[in-house]
Image (cartoon, helix red, strand yellow):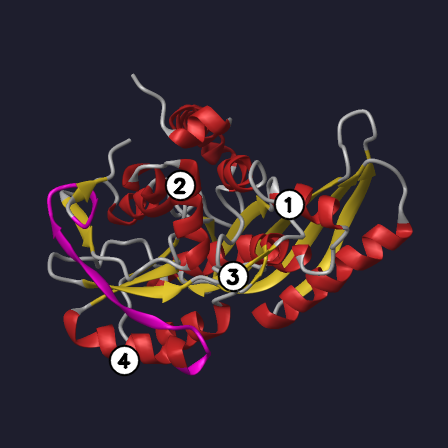
Amino acid sequence: MKKDAYAKAGVDVKRVRKIQDSLAASLAGTFSNRRGRFGTPLMGIGHYAGLIDIGGGRALAMHTDGVGTKVQLAVQMDRYETIGIDCVAMTVNDLICVGAEPVALLDYIALEREDESLVSRIMVGLIEGARRASTAIVGGETAIMGSSVKGFDLVSMGVGVVKRKKVLDGSAIAEGDLVVGVASSGLHSNGYTLARSVLQARHPLQERLDDLGSTLGDAMLAPTSIYVKPALEALRKREVHALGHITGGSFRKLTRLVGGRDLGFSLELPPPPPIFRMIQTEGGLSDSDMLRTFNMGVGLCAVVPAGEAGPVARVFQRSGFPATEIGVVSKGPGVRVGGLRLTD
């Protein structure tokens, strides 16, 4: 089978998913280990976050994620003050997708060598990200791994709390529900292996590009949006059936929201921001390659009953995030964007 552009660049999402499925099948066997005061996990592995019953009608949500090869751009540009925002965002934005309020984070920094200045600069973004998410960073780990790491790597693990009756497991999604798309700040923290292979082959990071209104490096380092505050407000005040963070695998990730039911998503996206158009044009990439790899300007999707699309969009708009109706839940599995089916 012909490889897509992302696989050719070095990340084969299909093979990654097979690895993840294998891991999930193996790890599910550990659920029976859970005895005593707290219950077993509430959902299987594969949603946006794991959940375990902690009593009192509440569940603990857990998730871990990293920044990926975006850290290489930070090293190349000697710019480390925003990469921590990305690290926080990638974890807390997934926690809210099960309805949880993020309450605490841990960070893991792997360094090529001891570098106090580098760590201090990374911490600037971690602290700012925690502020935007209204959460606390309560500890972490710093490892010196010169034989394995060039530059640094950055990962966070987060926990959140949600009432069991408020867990977003996708079961409330129904045919005819609408999808509200919330704007991203740009590439966020996914697809960088492909984006870098296309753009850095043609432009230095310091080059100012009129289409972008900034240097290439500034556009590619734009920190990931943190949607926690407006998302939690929407969950409190409006009826929301599901939230989907658009990250690795892009819009195909929405299929996890319906849990194998015969429901899918038909989307019509707004025009993508300039950086996505540039990647597609200069890389000669198909619409399918772009929609299977990048967020295309939509960082979060909210699935809501028809009457809630406008009010939910306005919650995000009041927090500075453009949001608009972009699709509908339809019969038949999968995701279609503009008539193009995004198959695995």
Dot in front, 4 or 3? 3
Main SS of the magenta part reads strand
Q: Are marks 4 and 2 in contact (CB under 8 Å)?
A: no
Question: Could you give the CA–CA distance between mark 1 and mark 4, rounded to whole angstroms?
Answer: 43 Å
User: Does the stretch in magenta take in 156?
Assistant: no
User: Taking 99 as reference, is 254 left or right?
Assistant: left
- 329 inside magenta stretch: yes
Q: Which residues are magenta?
A: 318-338
For label 3, the residue is 210
Q: Residue at x 20, y 51 (%)?
A: 265
Q: Amino acid at mark 4?
A: Pro
Residue at 59% in and 41% down: 68
Classify residue 313 by image quadrant: bottom left
Q: Does the image show residue 26? A: no
Name the residue that disc number 4 marks.
311
Which amino acid type is shown beneath numbered disc 2? Thr
The disc, 4 or 3, on the residue closer to the chain's N-terminal end is 3
Give the mark nearest the N terminus, 4 or 2. 2
Residue 279 locus on image (x, y percent): 44, 45
Residue 204: numbered disc: 1
Please name the residue shown 64% across and 50% down the image.
Answer: 156
Tell me which label, 1 or 3, sits earlier in the chain: 1
Q: Quadrant of the N terminus?
A: top left
Q: Residues within 10 Å of mark 3 (few under 14, many from 20)?
A: few
